[in-house]
Image: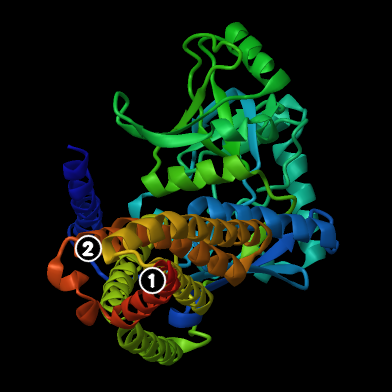
Amino acid sequence: MASSSRRKYPLRVLSAFGVLFVLCYTLILFTGDRGATPRLGVDLQGGTRVVLTAITPDGSRPSEDALRQAQQIISTRIDGLGVAGSEVIVDGDNLVITVPGQDGAQARTLGETARMFVRPVIGSQPAPDAPGEGDEEEGAADDDSEPVSEVLDPDELAAQISEARDLRQSDDPEVQQEALTTHECAPTDILAGNDLPDRPLVTCSNDGTMVYLLGPVLIEGEDIDSGSVTDGYNQQQARWEVSFRFGGDAGRDWATFTRENVGQQAAFVLDTAVVSAPVIREPTPAGSATSISGNFTQQEVRDLANQLRYGALPLSFDSSQAVTVSATLGLASLEAGLIAGAIAMVAVLLYSLLYYRLLGVVAALSLALAGMIVYGVLVLLGRYVNFTLDLAAIAGFIIGIGMTADSFIVFFERIKDEMREGRSFRSAVERGWQRARRTILTGNAVSFIAAAILYALAVGQVKGFAFALGLVTILDLVVVFMVTYPILALATKSKLLSNPRFNGLGAITQVARERAALAEAPSASKEAQQ
């Protein structure tokens, strides 16, 4: 019974790997865009660059600490969106964001200030200039072509911010009513990121159809528990929404406000734009989830959740036109690198076939399967988590596959050591595997820990290199444990494959016999003398 179980084990493991392999390529060919090409990074396919210009209320230069903090927050947002291969650098008083591909909308979203406030609604009315369908499209085009920072110098900008505050954030009820009646909604708000939290505010909804008079801020976005932010589709309400909880004192303040203002509206304000102004139907207990809903698309909900999850920027930014940038290295460099890697791989395989024969065939098959599974996972990562392939990641993959070859060599040399001690091919494979797998696990564990530490500490392309190295290290173990060893275990059950003349281990078998003969010769001589 035990012998039958041992015979079935390699077949089961190989079958399991076959299922994983088929599943991987089934997902590639029959899901998503069904393309079998990985996403390429900026250095290989080019991308889109957006320059974010810092806006300060008094027109002064932003501090270096504020710019560095904004750079870190935007980089974290990029990680949250899974936009691999992106770059965020500080250039003077600006931040320059470069993302792979030709879509600049996502780069613009990353630079939004995302100052979230909760304000009570004092009054509201339809916007006097609510745009029609055609007007809204024209306004969006104007917003793209004339950013505030390009038409206003710092002194004029500061003066307009002060004037807007005097009109739209006045404590005088008459001024408030006048602003509510006459305020015109525009695609770009001069107070976005510059409104004063402790004063009332006259502002518009994010679609420009309503004008609101809001009270001072009740709760700030910093009080949101970032770990509780989720986005998704509400099946019952048939709408996209973002859910979160307020932490600490803010949760208790929100519970008190909802208890005392049932039937009233509370506005969730993102950079002076009211994204949602729900009516409070019932009190919200402290620590319970609160949702923001509105006329959102899936991408808008995802962007909003990302902004709330990773915090507000310390500065307000105005974005420039999205500019297409060419590949810094180009596909020619990629092709040259892949050709060089292929030549090196073929050389290694030829050497393995000449030196190990049957074991070299197993190594070649294992390396081919390892390369195919790595490629398949790479395509899926690009499709589902936006992982992009750049030259640094390619270097990580090539080094990782080289480590896979090292694992084979450790195993094969253990087999040869066992056969030198006089064991049969079947016994040498089993005992060699028991001794080699610890070494393989230890070596890969060290490599994975190094890759994980490098990934945690590095930025930019070095992070991509570390991710690729860690991924291939894991797949190395999968291939060695689920392909290489089971194939050799099955080979030991074949008389042809176990033949030393065929499997290339004849010389070692001959050496083992000669050692055994030499060891027996003194014993035979002593017996003859006796």
Work out whether 495 lies above or below 361.
Answer: above
Judge from the rendering whether residue 77 lies leftward or rightward of residue 512; answer left or right.
right
Placement of the N terminus among the 4 image quadrants: top left
For label 2, the residue is 492
State the separation of the CA atoms marked 2 and 1. Answer: 39 Å
Horizontal side of residue 187 vs 516, given as left or right = right
Mark 1 Cα within 10 Å, few/some/many (few <14, many 20+)?
few
- Residue at x 20% of width, y 57% of height: 18
Q: Nearer the viewer, residue 391 or 308?
A: 391
- Image location (x, y in percent) of residue 86: 55, 67
| Callout in the foreground (2, 1) | 1
Q: Is residue 386 visible?
A: no
User: Residue 367 occupies which quadrant of the picture?
Assistant: bottom left
356 or 128, nearer to the observer = 356
Is residue 377 visible to us here?
Answer: yes
Q: As shown in the figure, which amino acid type bears the numbered disc 2?
A: Thr
Picture colour scheme: rainbow
Give amino acid for label 1. Ala
Labels 2 and 1 touching (C-beta < 8 A): no
In the rendered image, residue 458, in percent from the top left (x then y), is placed at 66, 63
Q: Report the side of 9 relative to 47 (left or right).
A: left
Q: Secondary structure at mark 2?
A: loop
Residue pictured at 34% horizontal, 52% vertical:
133
The residue under the point 41% across, 49% down is 299
Q: Count residues near mark 2 (Cα–Cα under 10 Å), then give few for <14, some for 14-19, many for 20+.
A: some
**Residue identifier under label 1:** 528
